[in-house]
Amino acid sequence: MTETPFHQREAAIEDPSPLFSRLVICGQDVLLDILARHLERHPNGTRAFRHHVGSFAGLMALYQGKAHMASAHLWDGDKDIYNITYVRHILFGIPAVIIHLACRMQGFYVAKNNPKEIKSWQDLTRPDVTFINREKGSGTRVLLDEQFRRLGIDRRLVNGYEREELSHLAVASTVARGEADAALGNQKASLQVRGIDFVPLQKERYELVIKREDVDKPQLQTVIEILQSREFKAELQGLGDYDLTELGNIVAEV
């Protein structure tokens, strides 16, 4: 699919159509690009605009009426659950539906053969390890900060904690270039960058959030139909590295 020009994506965010003649989808995973393509080709579909932002920014766009759906992978370390806690509080009383997309593995990107043997959250505090972080509000950054809080790790001891990039591929590339020893991201991005290895740490739930008031609208019903279709699931299976067991299931109403 040809990428929507940046200025058109921003225009969509500023003024999403109240008539749903087009849908704004927030999130960064390639499966959302595939969803947008299926939506545009569906007999009852519509044009989709993709806004590549992290989980917090996507949910805020949904809350502010600048998007129609947003993906999230936000871990609550106290309850060991994904997304429900954050959706309830970021959408501030707006009923929402959470639809499961996939489970993905999160872990460290490290140099080939992991020469510094970086295997645990605590290893990031070692003086011989440099780190490259994700931006505040991304699901990956939330996972890191929640683990640090839960384990009592002082983030000030992490060399590079304040250095930020805006995507999995960007931090993976930083490690591949030797400009950092470790980064945190999903497994799929590690397979797209040469010269790095992946150290698995935690399975995460990647899900789609829609306002409850919008779910029954025809365009959103089409989205749900696509997510539950055999054709969409088959295309994602071809990509590999996703657990699609619950794809299309409505897992929570909050």
Image (cartoon, grey):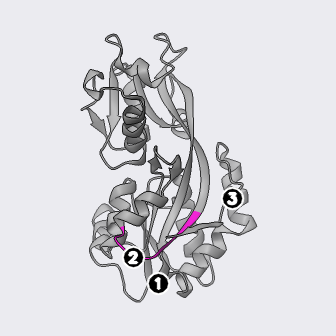
Callout 1 crowding tier (Cα within 10 Å): few <14, some 14–19, many ≥20 = few
Tell me the element at label 1. helix
- The residue at the point 64 percent across, 71 percent down is 226
Cα gap from disc 3 to disc 2, whole angstroms? 25 Å
Residue at horizontal 37 percent and vertical 61 percent from the top: 58
Mark 1 / mark 3, whichever is N-terminal: 1
Instruction: Give the amino acid at mark 3.
Output: Glu
Q: Is residue 229 magenta?
A: no
Q: Which residue in the structure is indicated by mark 2?
A: 94
Q: Is residue 229 visible?
A: yes
Give me the disc on residue 246: 3
* Residue type, numbered disc 1: Glu
Q: Earlier in the sequence, mark 2 or mark 1?
A: 2
The residue carrying pointer 2 sits among few (fewer than 14), some (14 to 19) or many (20 or more) residues within 10 Å by Cα, namely: some
Expressed as whole percent of the image width and height from the top left, the position of residue 202 reads 56, 36
Query: In this rendering, would 144 be left or right of 201?
Result: left
**Which stretch appears magenta?**
91-99
